[in-house]
């Protein structure tokens, strides 16, 4: 794993956007794996700025998001489809038909998971997967205890994750209880992974990832066994690493 230590959130976002736009310039039809959450807001803003300044074309890019809440449709302000549209897609020249997010309102959720997994394969797999990390070490919505062999599946969100995400909802009760997420095996098949971490909130998970054993108790710990991971983390996120 290559670790790029940066001062703060702004530096992390800038560096991440550079790596993503480099990937798209190198391969115009890149398949990007995308994430949501607070961590990614600065990266997407920097990516939009880069696009506007340099005309980097996303016309041939295909994207796959890691996850989506169950029960929130594209118009819901807290759905990840809505987030992606607002933060990124509406600014780029990417056709929306090339942007994929699990459908959390599909009538048959198991079939939706299988369809999503197949679609990633059909597109040739993910070239660059962007990842944040949960305070409990989750990646995507793969909570502690998730099998490393898991593919795209339905998960029940842990109470700690629901609590952490409640800040985006008007009340904690409104946070969905379930989500669809790419599995850990799906993520690990990506050719390259870019993990971002900022702030003290992430320090425990990052120290367990870097210094602990590979264990399903800390899902992100599996990333140590991937041959091509870059982590961009700021001083606070690295503050518990000895
Ligand atoms: C989001 C996702 C999650 C987040 C993680 C960190 O698509 O898959 O794993 O990356 O929960 O969230 P933030 O960035 O809000 O701290």
Image: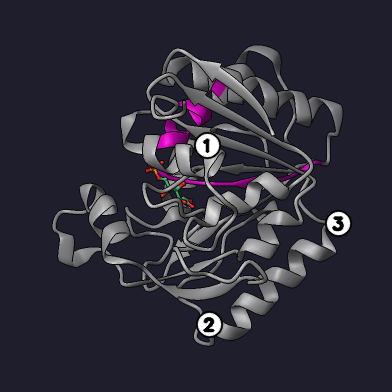
- Measure how far apart labels 3 and 1 are at the Cα level: 23 Å
Q: Residue at x 43, y 32 (%)?
A: 41
**Where does the magenta region start and end?**
30-46
Label 3 vs 1, first from the N-terminus: 1
Mark 1 residue crowding within 10 angstroms, few (<14) / some (14–19) / many (20+):
some
Q: Residue at x 59, y 25 (%)?
A: 16
Q: Going by the image, does 76 lie left or right of 62?
A: left
Q: Which mark is drawn over residue 103?
A: none
* Of labels 2 and 1, the one closer to you: 2
- Measure how far apart labels 2 and 1 are at the Cα level: 26 Å
Label 2 vs 1, first from the N-terminus: 1
**Residue 161: horizontal and vertical position, in percent?**
32, 58
* Of labels 3 and 1, the one closer to you: 3
Determine whether 57 is above or below 94 in the image.
above
- In the picture of the structure, the residue carrying the numbered disc 2 is 109
- Choose top left, top right, bottom left or bottom right for residue 79: bottom left
Disc 3 element: loop
**Residue 195: horizontal and vertical position, in percent?**
58, 37
Determine whether 224 is above or below 196 in the image.
below
**Residue 184: horizontal and vertical position, in percent?**
62, 62
Mark 2 residue crowding within 10 angstroms, few (<14) / some (14–19) / many (20+):
some
Disc 2 element: helix
Nearest the eye: 237 or 48: 237
Residue 25 belongs to magenta span: no
- Choose top left, top right, bottom left or bottom right for residue 128: top right
Q: Residue at x 47, y 71 (%)?
A: 104
- In the picture of the structure, the residue carrying the numbered disc 3 is 124
**Residue 101: horizontal and vertical position, in percent?**
57, 60
Nearest the eye: 89 or 126: 126
């Amino acid at each position: 794993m290559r670790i790029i230590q940066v001062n703060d959130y702004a530096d992390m976002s800038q560096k991440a956007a550079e790596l993503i736009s480099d990937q798209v310039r190198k391969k115009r039809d890149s398949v990007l794996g995308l994430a949501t959450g607070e961590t990614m807001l600065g990266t997407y803003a920097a990516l939009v700025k880069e696009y506007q300044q340099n005309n980097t074309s996303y016309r041939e890019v295909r994207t796959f998001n890691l996850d989506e809440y169950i029960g929130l449709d594209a118009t819901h302000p807290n759905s990840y489809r809505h987030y992606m549209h607002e933060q990124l897609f509406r600014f780029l020249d990417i056709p929306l038909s090339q942007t994929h997010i699990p459908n959390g309102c599909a009538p048959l959720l198991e079939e939706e998971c299988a369809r999503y997994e197949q679609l990633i394969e059909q597109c040739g797999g993910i070239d660059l997967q962007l990842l944040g990390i949960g305070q409990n070490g989750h990646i995507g919505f793969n909570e502690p205890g998730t099998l490393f062999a898991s593919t795209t599946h339905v998960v029940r969100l842990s109470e700690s994750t629901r609590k952490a995400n409640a800040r985006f909802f008007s009340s904690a009760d409104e946070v969905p209880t379930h989500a669809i997420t790419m599995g850990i095996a799906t993520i690990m098949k990506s050719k390259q992974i870019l993990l971002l971490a900022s702030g003290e909130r992430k320090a425990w998970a990052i120290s367990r990832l870097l210094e602990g054993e590979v264990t399903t108790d800390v899902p992100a710990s599996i990333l140590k066994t991937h041959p091509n991971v870059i982590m961009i983390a700021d001083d606070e996120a690295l503050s518990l690493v000895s």
